[in-house]
Amino acid sequence: MDQDPVVKKVVLDVLKPHQPQIPELASRIAACQGVERVGISLAEIDQNTESIKISIEGSDVKIDVVRKCIEDLGATIHSIDEVEVVKKTSQK
């Protein structure tokens, strides 16, 4: 049995336009493969954008898939602030 590392949690610093609103953004991210929980907190708001922190947890979070989903909604990832990776036992 091999132990493959998987991402269980990632926290992102994101800049987004006012639309879509935070609940819609959270729902769209939650629909991504491997994502089980999404939490978003508003850090700052200005005339055209919102700075938010997104905490994403799941069984096997695919950061590239999440990044594409976020970018498709007009938002930009400023930084990956936290990552939690565990070894998953796979049977071969």
Image (tube, helix red, strand yellow):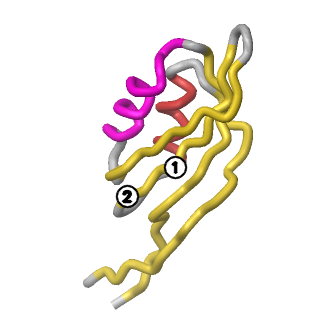
Q: Position of residue 67 (x, y in %)?
A: 55, 38
Q: Nearer the viewer, residue 30 or 53?
A: 53
Say which amino acid is labelled 1.
Ser
Location of residue 49 (image quadrant)? top right
Q: Nearer the viewer, residue 25 or 34?
A: 25
Label 1 neighbourhood size at 10 Å, few (<14), some (14-19), many (20+)?
some
Residue shown at 37% from the left, 30% from the top: 28
Q: Nearer the viewer, mark 2 or mark 1?
A: 1
Assign the N terminus to one quadrant of the image. bottom left
Q: Which mark is residue 55?
A: 1
Q: Position of residue 25 (x, y in %)?
A: 44, 27
Q: Which mark is residue 58?
A: 2
Name, please, the residue furthest toward the left: 91
Indicate whether residue 87 is drawn in magenta.
no
Assign the C terminus to one quadrant of the image. bottom left
Q: Position of residue 18 (x, y in %)?
A: 58, 14
Stretch of the chain drawn in magenta: 19-31
Q: Position of residue 26 (x, y in %)?
A: 41, 34
Residue shown at 31% from the left, 80% from the top: 90
Indicate whether residue 22 is drawn in magenta.
yes
